[in-house]
Structure formats: C-alpha cells, structure tokens
Amino acid sequence: MMVESASESIRSTPTSQNGVGTIPNQSDGGGAREGSASGETNGELSTAELLHFQQQQALQMARQLLLQQATGLSTPSSTENKQPSVQVPVSVAMMSPQMITQQQMQQILSPAQLQAVMQQQQALMLQQLQEYYKKQQEQLHLQLLSQQQAGKQQTKEAALGNKHLAFQQQLLQMQQIQQQHLLNLQRQSLVGLQPGQGQVTLPGLPQAVSPSDLQQLLKEMSNNQEDSNKQDNSELSSTISTSFSSSKVSPPIVHTSLPNGQSALQNPRRDSSSHYELPPSSHPLYGHGECRWPGCEALCEDMGQFIKHLNTEHALDDRSTAQCRVQMQVVQQLEIQLAKESERLQAMMTHLHMRPTEPKPFNQPLNLVSSATHTKMSPDNYPDGLPQPPTSATAPITPMRAGTSVISSSSLPSMGPVRRRIVDKFNTPISSVLQAQNQLYSARTPAYISTFHSILDPELAQNHEFYKNAEVRPPFTYASLIRQAILDTPDRQLTLNEIYNWFTRMFAYFRRNTATWKNAVRHNLSLHKCFVRVENVKGAVWTVDELEYQKRRPPKMTGSPTLVKNMISGLGYGALNASYQAALAESSFPLLNSPPLHNSSGSGIHGGHDDVTSTGEPGNSNESSPRLSPQYSQSVHVKEEPAEEDVRPASLSVPNQNTALPEDHDLEPETAMEDLSS
DNA sequence: CGCGATCTAAACATCT
DNA sequence: TAGATGTTTAGATCGC
C-alpha cells in the first residue's frame, strides 16, 4: 500500500487516492477563485488589479464555459442536412452535459424534432451572445459613468482616469471581439440556420456591434469624462494596444463593420433594469428554470425572479466583465478552431474520396461545439482540476437511450460490440458522437495533449480532453481504458491505485461513483487474461498482455471492411461523418497506438474494430518492452490465468509479443483505409 | 434463443 | 480492525 502510494506520487497525480470521488481540484480551485473574484467587486481596485482579477476570472471561466460554449454554439445545425437520421444526433450530441434536460428531451424527439431543437438552440445561443455583448457594453458604460461620478466627488482625476481608461479599453476590446464573433456567427448561422430561424438570430446581430454605436459610446464616455477624449477613438485604440495588451487574450481584431450593421444597438445606455429587450417570456440567459449565466445555473421559478437574480448576481462587476470577455474569447477560439478543422476535414474527405461536393457539413453542426471544448482546453490544460460546471456535477450525461440513438445503430457497424454496448447503455449515441467530434475538431493541437502522446494518436488524445472535462461517460470498455492507462506509462505498468488515478484524471465521469467503477476496474483486471498482475519491488503492478488483449475479440471489423465501405457509401456524407466519428471514437483508445499514424483518418476508420484493431500498441516506440520494464521482469508473478499459458505461451514469458505485433497493426489500419478510400 | 462481451453488484479472501 | 486490493460469482443488457 505504501508502496503504491509512492508510485503514484511518481506519476505526480494531483488527485490523491481519495480524490477520486471528490473532484477535489475542481471544486477547490473554483471556489478559491470565486472568492477572490467576489472580493474584487468593490470597484476599489486599481486598473492593474482589475486586470489581474479579470485574468483570473478568465481562466476560471474559460474552464467553466468550455462545455457550455460548446453546447450553445454547437447548435448551428445544418439545415441542409440530408441525413437527418445521422446529422441530428450528431448535432444533438453537441450539447454539453449541462443540457441534460434538453437531452432528456431529445429522447423523446424525432430526428426532425431534434434538429429543430438544435436550430432553436442556435438561435438562442446567438441571442445570448448578443445579450452578453450588449449587456456588457451597457454595464461597462454604466460603470464608467458611475465611476465618473464617484471620481468627481472625490476629485481624484488621476485615479479615475485610469479606471476610465480601463473601462474604455475593455469596452473597445469587447466590441472589437464582438464584432468579429458576431460576424462569424452570423456567417455560420446563415449557413446552418433555416430561413425561419435566421429571423430570430440574424437581425439582432448587427445591433450588438455596430461600429457607429461603438463610437457613440466612446464619445459619450469621453464627454462625460470631460476629458478631451472626443477625438480619440483612435487614441483609445492605440492606448489599448499598448497598455492593455497584457490583459488581452484575444488577438487583435480588425475593425470590420458588419454588412448590415448600421445602427442597431438599440440603446446602449439603457438603464440596467432594462437590459433585456427580449420578450418577458424568453431570455437567452434563462432556460429550463435556471439562470444560464456561465457557471451560475441558479434556479429561478419565473422570469421575474430570474431578472431579479440577474440584476443582483450578475450585475456589472469585474467578474461579470471577465466572464463576458471569456465568453467572447471562447467564441473567437471556436471560430478559429472551426476554420482549421473544417479545412482538415475537407482534406480528409478529399483524401478518402468522399464527395467533395458535400462539404457543407464542414461548416456545420459539429464545428462549433467540438472546437469549443478543445480550443479552450488546450490553452489551459488542467490535468485534473477543471472546474466543472455545476450542472455537470449533478448530472452526468447519460440519459440518451439506445432507442433514441439514431446514430448508434446506423453508424456503428464499425463499432465493436464493446463500445456499442456502452454507447447504448450510456446514451452514448451522443457522447460517442461528441467524442468523435472532438476528435475531428480538436485535432491537431498535440500541444495540449498532455498525457497521451506517447501512445495515442493525437486525435484520440483530444477526445480525452473532452472527457477529462465533461462528465460524459467514455464510450470505451473498462478493459480498453485500463489497457490504455497502463500503456500510457513508460513502464507499461501501473498499480491499481495508479489506474484509478488515471481514470479520474482523464475522465470527469469517473470522478464520481468511485465505488462502482473501481469495483469494475478491479473486476476487469482480475477477469481478463490480458491484464497481468506482476509483483515487483513496489508491490503489485498491472500490465497488459497485448497478445491476449487482441485475442479477446476477433477482429470483426477487420474482416469486414466492406461493411464499412458500404455503410459509408450508403449513408452519404452525413452518415459517413457520424459513423466515421463513431468509428474514431471507438477505436480511439484501443488502437491508436500509432503515433506515426498521425493521419488519424486511417486509424480512425479502421479503428472501427474497436479494441481489436488495437492490435497493437505497436506503434509505440516505447513499445519495445511493455511489460518488460525493469521491475517487471523482477517478479513475474503472473495472474493465474488458467488458459493463459496454453493459449499464449509466449505472452507471459515473452516479453513482448508486442514487438511482433506492430507490423500486423500497421497493416490493418492501412488496409482498412484502402477499403474506405476506394 | 443461445452465446459472448460487458457492466454492475456483491461476497469473500488476502494483504498492509 | 479498517481499508485497499484481488478474486469470484451472479444477474442483467446488448448485439450477433
């Protein structure tokens, strides 16, 4: 025991043994920051302090918002999806765990309905963004004014000047970002929304950002300030670029006026009580009886209560401002990520000979969402302690039923039984899709793949980013996860406790119900021959007998590549997309061994066979001595597998069949690819 | 319907 | 003795 603890420490796992079920990092970190944040609301802070706090807030919020963003933004579902059966689920899947209620709703909705819902969500999201921007503008403005007042009274011109400047800067910055975001969103929504939907969202866009408004605001501020700033939009901007640069997270944005952005900002300086112009019955920040302000989720029985809540809890303060900024950054990141991923997907599709003519999907549904998660995560890659949105904490996303999963059935030919099962069981139609999406979009930022690079394909690893933060049950069997955990280490061996830690570290889902899944882990370790217990100096460690692991399941997919092919061709792009993603998801852990196989596309698809394909960890250079690790050899106390010996004489004794396997693996993927592409 | 894979739960044994 | 670690068994679901 002590020994194991020690070993654990080596892995430097933040979460202690018990941390498993408590999600310590998250709550702690979040709480701490909250506290500091609340303290700063006094408005007594200096500009520097303000910025500092905002940055903190930004970090915190970034984490909290990731999922939410993904959810909200995801909605730009494609109107032109020709494969509702597939597309819908996909888009639905984009909903984050926070949207549980909606997910539940999905269970009873038809694909078409779901699609409609998605679109509505998109509209909502856009509105929400608008509101954010608008509100922030107003609030900033108001705050500025109030500051001025205070300043006058105190006649502390200098100090006030700083604050004023800071606010102006904020405002300007925010508006700049806002402009771009809205433009992008608008663009996307145009693509993804149906005409009807467009009405809801588009019209409003311009109002939030019009340049003229911006100017006006600035002017006002300037006037009020009595400073000689009138001249200064230019001046301000220059100031911002310089002094404010530090706090700025988002890249400089060119001031581009919206196409139709004339006017609009209905009334930037409305009093705070009248911020919301939406019908009383609806508010972008209010839904399902709760406040949807990032990280809030306070329950509000009715709109009135909500408004009250909004004005009290989310009034203009540093925190709100920071949150808003974070939100904007998130959106921006999403945009960027979307562009990248779209490009990538296009290339992939081209490579696979998919109909290039149907590239629409690129801009569609998937994009926003997935990218959201990744994008954000990457930057601040918090190994464990990502603060989970409150919601997620209460409701892990599991609710989708197999029955509902349009996708699961259709797209899964590629998926191995294992995965599918899980999928069904855990509603994974969505989660799997989500996962797949993540893979697609997150992609190439190996930079933030902290743990998996060694063994996993970057894409897969990315999925982990998602699961690491979203309480979504990973669509992998315990066996595959355990294996992954073990293979993810240099020595290819882990103590039970380390395995636990890996689970909790890599999957938010496993930060709860520890008793259950831990039991399952132990059960799997004991049950499967592929897991070999080895006693060494440190104590007992578990290793993977790759050969045995592969043996476990016959390469279903491998044998029927045609199946995959047919499926793809038959379903059409959308379907392919989904299935492909599912396949990716499925294969992810198991197979990916191939670091070199960077072209996930190949591995992903073939991966359909789930673990089977896995065949190999091979790819790993480390592979060489999976279980041979020094300690390993020392005490090869293998599990008592009965058949073990018979079946694979070499397995145990032979250090690594793995070495041999690699080749096979490599081949597999490729062949699979071939089939697909052809 | 049977089978195999997987999950969950739980009892029990062993070790620290 | 308690808790962690392992092993087993049993019931249930799911897909083939």
Image: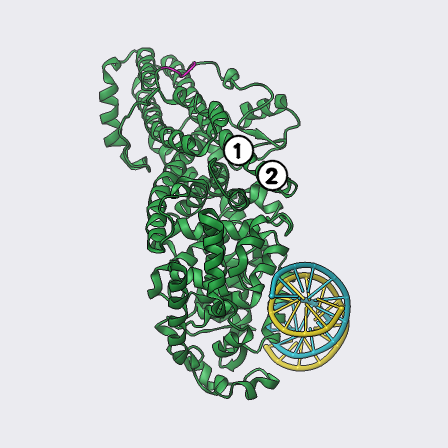
Chain colours: A green, B yellow, C cyan
Marks 2/1 in contact by CB < 8 Å: the verdict is yes
Residue at image location 55% in from the left, 85% down from the top: A647
Residue A293 in view in this figure: no
* Placement of A114 over or under A622, stated as above or below: above
Residue at image location 58% in from the left, 26% down from the top: A309
Question: How dense is the environment of label 2, judged by Cα within 10 Å: few (below 14), some, or many (20 and up)?
Answer: some
Q: Are marks 2 and 1 on the same chain?
A: yes
Residues in magenta? Answer: A263-268
Q: Which three-letter amino acid code belongs to the residue tagged 2?
A: Gln
Residue at image location 36% in from the left, 32% down from the top: A184
SS of the residue at dot 1?
helix
Chain letter of the residue beneath label 1 in the structure image: A
SS of the residue at dot 2?
helix
Residue A121, disc: 1
Chain letter of the residue beneath label 2 in the structure image: A
Which of the pair A623/A192 is nearer the observer? A192
Residue A475, disc: none
Q: Is residue A587 highlighted in magenta?
A: no
* Placement of A586 over or under A169, stated as above or below: below
Say which residue label 2 marks. A102
* Placement of A334 over or under A141, stated as above or below: below
Give residue A164's position: percent from left, percent from top: 33, 21
Quadrant position of residue A153: top left
Q: Which three-letter amino acid code belongs to the residue tagged 1?
A: Gln
Question: How dense is the environment of label 1, judged by Cα within 10 Å: few (below 14), some, or many (20 and up)?
Answer: many
Give residue A151's position: percent from left, percent from top: 37, 16
Residue A568 in view in this figure: yes
Q: Is residue A84 left or right of residue A630?
A: right
